[in-house]
Structure formats: C-alpha cells, structure tokens
C-alpha cells in the first residue's frame, strides 16, 4: 500500500478479527481517546513494524460510516508500505500478529543436535524438543519423551542419523512411538539413507538390507494425520525409491542446489565444468547441472585392475568439479582427479552429498596448495548429512560443509 492512502475495514462486531496478507515482526499499540466537539471516538495510535522500517498508523472511527473504520498511514514517504498480517480485536483494542505458518515440534538424536539447532534457526515455526536417551544396565535403550501430552495435536518431526547399526534400534523405538501420541502428523527426516551402498543381488542368498530398512520404515504406525512422511537426500540406488510401501510418503530431496549456489560464489564461476566419475553419477545428476560444460569419466577393467578413463568432455583450463552422491574410501574420486589433472584441468574440486569416509578415509584427500591439481583438490564440498564426518573434517582443507538445514526446514513446512 502506498503512503497517504486509506484502507476501509469492516467491523462486524467488537470481537471481529481483521487480517491482512503479510506478517510483521513486532506490533506496538497505544490507546488514546479524543472526546470533544468532534465526532471521532476511540482514536488508536499504533505502530506496525516490519523487518526494515517502522510505519506509524492511526485507526479512527469515521462519522457516518459506522460500522466501518479506516486505517490511514501517517508516514510521509512515498515508498510502498508492506502490510502486516495482524488482527484487531475491537473490544480490547488489541493488535496482535498472527502467522499461518505450520508449527513443528522437532525431536532429534544426540548425533543430529547441531543440525537440529540450525534447522530451528531457519524458522520461528520449528521448536526443538528433547528426548532422554538413557540405557539400562544391560545396555538396552531406556528412552523417555518428556511432556508427551504436550505434543498432542501438534505436527511432529524426528531428525535421525543411522550412522551405524548400533544406533538404529534406539531411534526406531522413538520413531515408532511418536506417531501414537495423538499427534497431527509425523515426519521422519533421514538425510542419509545408509544401506545399499555396497549391495549387489548377484548370488542366491544375498540379503538386500536396503529393502529391509525400507520395509521397516514403511511400517511406522500411522498418526492421526495419516502416513509418515520421509525426507531423505540423494538416495544412492535409484531403484530404492520403489522399496517403500504405501504407508510412508517419501520426499526425495537433493543437495545439488546447495552446490550450485556455492559455485555461483566462486571468482571463476564462469569457468566451472562438471565431471562425473562414472555413468551412474551422470544419470543421477546431469539434469540438474546441464547448464555447465560436462565431462564424463568411466571405469574400465585392465586385467585385475579397474582404471578411470576420460570418456567425453575437455577439462583443459577449466575449474573442474567432480560430482557424486557419496564417497566411501575415495579411491574412484582420486583416480578421477589424476585423470583430469593429466588432461590439463586448471583446478579440481569435488562435491558429494554424503561424506561417509569409513576408517577416516577423508585423510586421503589433500589440498592443492594454490593451484596444483595434480597434488590435491581446491575444494571438497560435503553436506552435514553425516554428522560424525562433519566433526572430523571441521576446519581441515580442502573440506567445506554445506548445510542441509535450510532445505530440511523448507521440507518440514510442506
């Protein structure tokens, strides 16, 4: 609304609430009366503040227009004034802000505490709730959810980390318990779906643990709002999307938008090319990165060895970023780096959504020391989907962590 313009608002009764379409950060109201020869009554001076500038407003009853009132902006500026999503209760002359944003109670395990705090910082509608993770003398979980009655009718989420089989059972116990506490809806956030990274169903008797975990999650009890929603990022094997049953609603997110934002911040962003270490990575990500020049590598077998070769594309003079969904030992990435350096890449960086690095294999990756791609990487970007890895590589070049907090917060508001 422009300055010096009026907005007519209908008051049906003293308790009618009137709202606009946008929210304010704070509202201050003072109540005064002008009683005299004029017909104006109950003059209310108030100030509606947005995140940038305060705008003084007055609310007056207009003679001869009852039951209407007008709100006038008394600011002299000609700039556009953002309206606040506020409500006016005429009887109490109280102006209160109201947000229609979805409110979520977010529980978390010990490993995901830091990420949970970052998620909560993204939105005022996300409130952190604690769980008491205790153990009995025999080592089995002794878990308590404080104030369980307080989450009745609330939207509830749980931020999980299945970093090892040892921690999965205790978290599954909570995941199965929360939907039965009369909550409105339940969302499970599992940034890294851990099983299936090495699985091959090649011989009779091979057990598909990814399918097993998907079946376990598909049988989470239904909350009052319906099936559980599952938020996960860059699942390793594309066929795992179809492992889930009808009792769970998978929401498959990606960390690639974080990478694209980071690449735009580089001083040589106009010279970046994307390299895929194999055809699987190309199939998974090329549609999201198609506006970059593309390089594809491939693994070929020579005797007993599998060697990485350049399949297509030209890395010469480019800042080449190797992209994949996850890294374990890192052998393929290192071989890919050597091939790209041999073909004239000016710089080489890498990105994976899930930095697993068992047995501290992240130590294999060295910094290039100012533009020597044959010696190491300029950057190695990972997300915080694997919290234990984040702690290990913090402030160690070439690693840089891109947080999923904003993406998760947005997914929770769906």
Image (spheres, grey):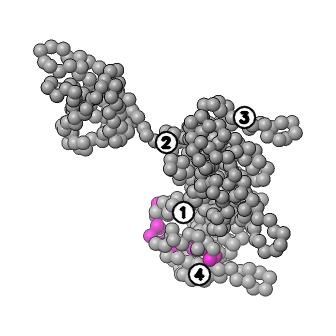
For the residue pair 86 and 375, the one nearer the viewer reads as: 86
Secondary element at tag 3:
strand
Dot 2 or dot 1, earlier in sequence: 2
The stretch drawn in magenta includes residue 249? no
- Graded by Cα atoms within 10 Å as few (under 14), some (14 to 19) or many (20 or more), the crowding at tag 2 reads some
Mark drawn on residue 214: none
Residue topped by disc 2: 102
Q: Kindly check if marks 3 and 2 are in contact, taking CB atoms under 8 A apart as contact.
A: no
Give the mark toward the camera: 4 or 1: 1
Distance between mark 3 and mark 4 Cα atoms: 58 Å
Q: In the rendered structure, which segment of residues is drawn in magenta? A: 265-279
Q: Which image quarter: residue 16?
A: top left
Residue 362 higher or lower than 334, as above or below: above
Distance between mark 4 and mark 1 Cα atoms: 26 Å
Secondary element at tag 2:
loop
- Graded by Cα atoms within 10 Å as few (under 14), some (14 to 19) or many (20 or more), the crowding at tag 1 reads many
Secondary element at tag 4:
loop
Residue topped by disc 1: 256
Percent coordinates x, y for residue 287 in the rendering: 51, 71
Dot 4 or dot 2, earlier in sequence: 2
Residue topped by disc 3: 144
Percent coordinates x, y for residue 355 in the rendering: 66, 59
């Amino acid at each position: 609304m422009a300055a010096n313009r009026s907005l007519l608002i209908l008051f049906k009764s003293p308790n009618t609430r009137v709202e606009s379409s946008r929210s304010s950060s704070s509202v201050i109201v003072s109540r005064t009366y002008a009683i005299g020869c004029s017909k104006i009554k109950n003059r209310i001076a108030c100030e509606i503040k947005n995140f940038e500038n305060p705008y003084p407003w007055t609310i007056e009853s207009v003679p001869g227009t009852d039951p209407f009132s007008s709100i006038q902006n008394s600011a002299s500026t000609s700039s556009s004034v953002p309206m606040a999503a506020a409500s006016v209760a005429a009887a109490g002359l109280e102006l209160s802000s109201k947000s229609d944003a979805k409110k979520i109670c977010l529980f978390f395990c010990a490993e995901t505490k830091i990420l949970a705090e970052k998620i909560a910082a993204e939105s005022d509608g996300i409130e952190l709730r604690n769980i008491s993770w205790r153990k009995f003398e025999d080592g089995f979980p002794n878990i308590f959810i404080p104030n369980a009655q307080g989450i009745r009718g609330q939207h509830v989420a749980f931020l999980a980390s299945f970093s090892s089989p040892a921690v999965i059972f205790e978290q599954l116990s909570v995941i199965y318990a929360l939907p039965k506490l009369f909550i409105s809806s339940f969302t499970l956030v599992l940034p890294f779906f851990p099983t299936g990274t090495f699985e091959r169903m090649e011989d009779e008797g091979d057990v598909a643990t990814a399918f097993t975990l998907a079946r376990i999650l598909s049988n989470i009890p239904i909350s009052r709002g319906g099936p559980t929603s599952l938020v996960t990022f860059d699942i390793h094997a594309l066929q795992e999307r179809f492992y889930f049953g009808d009792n769970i609603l998978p929401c498959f997110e990606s960390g690639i938008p974080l990478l694209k934002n980071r690449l735009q911040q580089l001083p040589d962003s106009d010279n970046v090319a994307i390299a895929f270490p194999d055809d699987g990575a190309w199939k998974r990500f090329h549609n999201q990165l198609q506006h970059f020049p593309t390089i594809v590598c491939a693994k070929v077998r020579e005797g007993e060895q599998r060697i990485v070769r350049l399949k297509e594309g030209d890395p010469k003079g480019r800042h080449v970023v190797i992209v994949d969904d996850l890294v374990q030992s890192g052998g393929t990435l290192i071989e890919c780096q050597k091939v790209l350096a041999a073909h004239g890449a000016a710089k080489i960086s890498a990105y994976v959504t899930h930095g697993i690095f068992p047995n501290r294999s992240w130590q294999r990756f060295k910094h290039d020391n100012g533009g020597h791609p044959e010696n190491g990487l300029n950057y190695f970007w990972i997300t915080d989907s694997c919290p234990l890895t984040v702690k290990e590589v913090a402030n160690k070049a070439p690693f840089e962590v891109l947080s999923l907090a904003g993406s998760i917060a947005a997914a929770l508001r769906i």
